[in-house]
Amino acid sequence: MNRQTMIALALVSAAACTEKDTTQKMAQALQVGSTHPDEVPKALNTELPFRYPAALYARRVQGNVTLRLFIDRDGQVMSDSTRIEESSGYAALDSAAVKGSQELRFVPAKLRGEPMATAVLFPVYFRHPEAHALPGDTILNKRGLAP
């Protein structure tokens, strides 16, 4: 893995998970569906699996992708159910977010102590260390989500 890829991975991971419980907080805040669990899904990944597309990284292209993930009773992301809720405007970033989501693992949501399937909105932030901040990044910095 080259230095550029490692930096990109670190930044994507840092942008989405700087704070220890950021992923869990985002999943809780963005919980969707009719039955709400008592406990939201908790990410198990120590590093997020999103790979910044090299061509876009080289051009310093940045963007946000919001995914709708369906997490089953075992904490697995049902990849065939993953949808782009909000596009970054760049097909390659959207595709990288969807592809990376297949490697996410969760402690499943629970209702009255029993595991349950649920859908969540999951944001993925692609940031380049040498690019200008995007509109709204100031709120990410306040939440500890952006580098």
Image (cartoon, grey):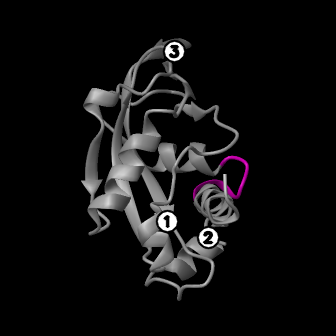
Near mark 3 (Cα within 10 A), the count class, few <14, some 14-19 or many ≥20, is few
Q: In which quarter of the image is residue 93?
A: bottom left
Which portion, as a residue range, is magenta?
16-21
- In this view, which residue lies farthest toward the right? 20
Q: What residue type is labelled 1?
A: Phe
Near mark 1 (Cα within 10 A), the count class, few <14, some 14-19 or many ≥20, is many
Q: Which corner quadrant holds the C terminus?
A: bottom right
Residue shown at 60% from the left, 63% from the top:
8
Disc 3 versus disc 1: distance between alpha carbons?
A: 36 Å
| Label 3 sits on residue | 112
| Label 1 sits on residue | 126
x, y (%) of residue 119?
35, 33
Disc 2 versus disc 1: distance between alpha carbons?
A: 9 Å
Query: Do the CB atoms of the residues marked 3 and 1 lie less than 8 Å apart?
Result: no
Residue shown at 56% from the left, 43% from the top:
49
Q: What residue type is labelled 2?
A: Ala
| Sequence-earlier tag: 3 or 1 | 3
- The answer to whether residue 131 is left or right of residue 79 is right
